[in-house]
Image (tube, rainbow, N blue to C red):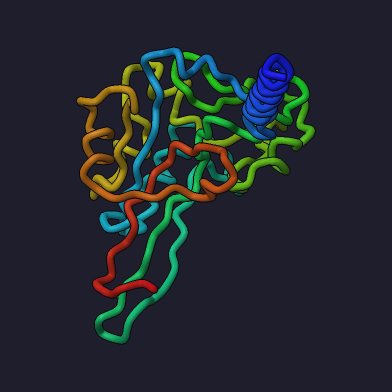
Amino acid sequence: METSKRQFLKGCGALIAGISVYTVTKSPLAENANTDASQTEVKYAMVHDENACIGCNACVEACRETNHVPDGVTRVKIERTGPFGNYPNQSYRFNRVSCQHCEAAPCVRVCPTGAAYIDKDTGIVAVNSDRCVGCQYCIAACPYQVRFINPETRTADKCDFCQQTQLSKGLQPACVLACPTQALTFGNLKDPDSALVKLLKTKPTYRAKVDLGTRPKLFHIQTIDGEVML
């Protein structure tokens, strides 16, 4: 009887372990995600301070000029909502809309050619235009709706933190350098001494659509209007 009980419990344990492993390995978003980035010492991210942002669009124009983004499309957009409050005490809210550089990126998972990928050295979600066939699967899969087809190259395009332009020269992204109010902070999540990490430790932030399991790396410091939001 004892032998049978031990065999039964052993079998149940193996079954439970098998279920746990299956749940982890079959995550719909992480299944084909590049996990090499987690083994490096660099994982780039950005913080947008909505309280400091004035909606001037300097970041948008700097990105366009630096990365040669054609008219009619954009890698970065500042959305304005409002006004809130009563005149003359009115305010607007500004939100940065751009690639979230997800750690479990849906666009990477659906790309049939490997053109969409996560750079193993930086964690940046990038596009290899030489491999892109313009199928637009990545555009359909992105829950943030930040990808587009470049009208000149006819390939998928989006923010890449100025990987091929600024970062390759050891510089900060163009949008960060152009911001007159220092509303943008860029850095390495794995560097505890970086301005980015220090900011994240001192200011409450939020990320968009985290319930989808994409693990975005674009953080927002929410606008404080002086009232309790219920």
From the viewer's perspective, is 25 left or right of 100? right
Q: Is residue 43 left or right of residue 182?
A: right
The image shows residue 15 at horizontal and vertical percentages of 71, 24
- Residue drawn at x 70%, y 36% is 138
Q: Residue 150's x, y, as percent?
A: 65, 36
Residue at screen point 23% across, 27% down:
194
- Residue furthest toward the front? 1
Where does the N terminus fall, quadrant-wise? top right
Q: Is 74 situated left or right of 12 in this image?
A: left
> 65 or 183: nearer the eye?
183
Where is 32 relative to 141, above or below?
Answer: above
Q: Quadrant of residue 153?
A: top right
When the figure is inspected, residue 102 is found, relative to residue 191, above or below; the finding is below
Q: Residue at x 62, y 24 (%)?
A: 33
Report the front residue among 141 and 19: 19
Q: Position of residue 6 (x, y in %)?
A: 66, 18
Q: Which is more toward the observer, 92 or 221?
A: 221
For the point 32% across and 61% down, which residue is it? 223
Question: Is 158 situated above or below 41?
Answer: below
Give percent across and percent down for residue 30: 62, 29
Q: Nearer the viewer, residue 32 or 195?
A: 32
Quarter occupied by residue 196 = top left
Q: How many marks?
A: 0
Is any part of residue 157 visible from this angle? yes
Q: Quadrant of the C terminus?
A: bottom left
Q: Is residue 47 above or below residue 37?
A: below
Does residue 68 appear in the picture of this structure?
no
